[in-house]
Every structure is written in structure tokens, then in C-alpha cells.
Amino acid sequence: MVKIISLKKEAQKEIKKAKDLKELDQIFKKYLGKRGKITQILRSLKKLKKETRIKIGKEANLLKKIVEENIREKAEKLKEKARAEILKKEQIDVTVPGKKVILGHLHPLTQIQRKVEEVFQSMGFSVVEGPEIETEWYNFDALNIPKDHPARDFWNTLWLKKATGDRRQETRLLLRTHTSPVQVRFMGKNPPPLRIIVPGRVFRHEATDASHEVNFYQIEGLMVDKNISVANFKAIIQKFFKKFFGKPARGPLRPRSEASEARQGRPIKIRLRPSYFPFTEPSFEVDMTCLTCRGKGCSACQRTGWMEMMGAGMVHPNVFKAVGLNPKDWQGFAFGMGLDRLAMMKYKINDIRLFYSGDLRFLNQF
Ligand code: FA5
């Protein structure tokens, strides 16, 4: 009897102390499991005399019921506590301010490229692309610049190493020095009439300064049809400049529109200068008033007040012949515009190298 009373106290103390269901399960096994303390008392009953067996049996069964009940109640409490803890963890405080997601934006040169594409597309031009690794033939020969022609010196070229002993490589490879090879690639596959622009990266092995980079972007333009003349080129390019500089750029550095420049007595001027390119005849260069200094002269325009924006001209008969077209049937104009320089003028940036600096203080302004 004494044993039963002390066992009850012992079990109840342990049940009260149990911190989780695992501990409670151990307690169950200790007292009520196969070899549990209470189970053993119940099993030993049969060895007792009838009178004692009835008395002890009654007490032991009562103890079993009480301990079972205590364990069940404690299990409920522990489960409830665990549920509350999970709920607490999963709680969402809708009033907590959200975390700010940092979004990037398009590079200013990409923004300018898209704007240029938009303007030319509105004038019926399609956007075409070509490879940055080009063959010597497309970059030079097909553009009427044969080997040993002095004009090859205009473009300081980055040549790619030939795989040694590779006889199959008939033509040398290079990093294209301009977007003009795409004129030939496109005309070779698409019969005129045609109007295309070709934006893309070009490479030159030359010293950098405020308006020259080793790696920069050009936009080639090509229009081929019957009866095309320099007048058509002038009209298209004037319209382009008007549309491109006419509207203020997005971003904090908004250049004044052509109209407002004109009101100030300082209109944006464009001039055509006679020039020479082996793949156009006649050839010219197009300059515009340097908007960084408004024509006064600065480091960006090499103190001339003018920024050279593009080379251009009427497609040379030899280029038409290289793609199997009869120059007597077709005429066209072509131009190669410096995209970086357009961006410099649009945003009044005085050094081309800023575009490639990766400096966020610069880039975040656009
Ligand atoms: C050419 O590259 C010719 N392919 C352009 C052309 C196309 C002429 C079609 C006729 C017909 P040029 O080397 O001048 O020409 O370059 C054209 C433009 O690219 C320049 O007017 C200038 O705006 C830009 N440019 C040239 N070199 C650099 C440089 N190192 N860094 C940044 N922009 C440059």
C-alpha cells in the first residue's frame, strides 16, 4: 500500500515536470509500459492471497487509471502549447514596412540605341544585326578595300590569331572595325528596295581620349532603291536629328530641344564635310554643333565646337557589284553613326569613357 501511494506521488511529480511529448512518452513506458512499475504490480497480483489480492488489485487499478488520466491531460496541454508556438512563429505582421527591392535600369547607351531604332523604324527602316567577329573579306575586301590598300589604315584593326596550320581558314578573322560589313551581308541575301539600320559594337586598336574608345557602338544605315540621291540622305538625316534631339531625353540631364536652342539664338547646326570612304562615292562626314560646350570648344570636341557624328555617302558601284547587283539599276546611301557620340550630345557628357567606367554615380543619373 505504501508502495502504491509513493509510486503515485513519484509518477505525478514526473508528469508535472515533463517538458514535451517525448518525455511524457518515456514516463508512460516507465509506469505503464510492458515492464512498467504499475504493470509489474498488476502482474504480481496472482501470487498474492485472495484477500490481499482484492485489496491491492483495487488500489493498483485505481493508480493505473489515475496515472493514465494524468498523462492524457498533460499530453493535451503539451499539444496545445506546441500549436500556440507554431502559430506565434507563423504570425504575419501586415503593418511591418516591406523590404525595398533594388531594381536596375537600362544602360544609357541601350536607352539611346532604342530611341534611335524607334525614330528610324518610324521612317520605314528595319533593324538588322551582324556578327562582332568578322571576316577580312566582309570588313574590307567586299567594301572595296583590297589587301594593301592604304585605306585599311583608317581602321586600326584588332586581328584574331589564326589556328596554326589550319589551311581551311581561307580568310583571316578580326573584331569588326565598323558596322559597314552588314551592308554587304544583308544585300547579299535581300534584294532591294531596302531600308535598314544596323546597331552594334565595333572595335578599334587606338588610343582613347574624351571622344574615342577602343570599343564603342555604331549605327549603320542603308537605303537602296531606284533614283536615290544625296538629297534623300540629307532629308532622312535631318528628320532623324530633329526627332532625336527634338524631344527631351528621359533622365535628369535634359538637353534643350532644337526649338528652344533656336529661341536662344544657338540652333543645333549640322554640316556635311567632303570626305573619303572606299565604299561610298561621293563621301562625306556629318558634324553637329557640340552640345557639351554649345559650339564654344571643349575637350569632347577637341576645341573645334563641332562633334563628328557619322561617315556617309552614296553606295560605291563596286559594293553593288560585290553582292551581284547592277549599279546602273540601283542607287543608295549609307551612313555609319557613332552611337556613343549621339548619347554624349543628348545628355551633354564630356567624356565617352564614362559610359564604360561602371561607375554607379554616373549610371544612376539615367
Ligand atoms: C566608319 O566607320 C564608316 N564605316 C562609316 C560609313 C558608313 C561611311 C557607311 C560611309 C558609309 P568612321 O571611322 O569615321 O567611319 O566612324 C564613323 C563614326 O563612328 C564617327 O563619325 C564617330 O562618330 C564614330 N567613331 C569613330 N571612331 C570612334 C571611336 N574610337 N570612339 C567612339 N566613336 C568613334
Image (cartoon, rainbow, N blue to C red):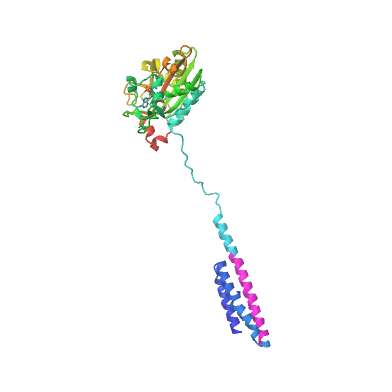
State the image coordinates of residue 321 (x, y, percent, origin top left): 44, 16
Question: To which quarter of the image does residue 166 belong?
Answer: top left
**Disc count in the image?**
0
Considering the image in quadrants, where does the C terminus appear? top left
Residue 2 counted in the magenta span: no
Q: On the picture, is 198 further left or further right than 9?
A: left
Q: Is residue 60 visible?
A: yes
Question: To which quarter of the image does residue 267 belong?
Answer: top left
State the image coordinates of residue 79 (x, y, percent, origin top left): 59, 64
Residue numbers of the magenta segment: 52-78
The prevailing secondary structure element of the residues shown in magenta is helix
Vertical relation: 201 (above or below) 318: below
Q: Nearer the viewer, residue 337 or 283?
A: 283
State the image coordinates of residue 78 (x, y, percent, origin top left): 58, 66
Q: Is residue 295 visible?
A: no
Q: At 56% from the left edge and 67% from the top edge, which residue is drawn?
A: 22
Q: Nearer the viewer, residue 3 or 191?
A: 191
State the image coordinates of residue 331 (x, y, percent, origin top left): 46, 14
Considering the image in quadrants, where does the N terminus appear? bottom right
Vertical relation: 236 (above or below) 34: above
Residue 74 counted in the magenta span: yes
**Ligand 1 occupies quarter:** top left
Question: To which quarter of the image does residue 238 belong?
Answer: top left
Q: Nearer the viewer, residue 116 or 300?
A: 116
Q: At 65% from the left edge and 81% from the top edge, which residue is drawn?
A: 59
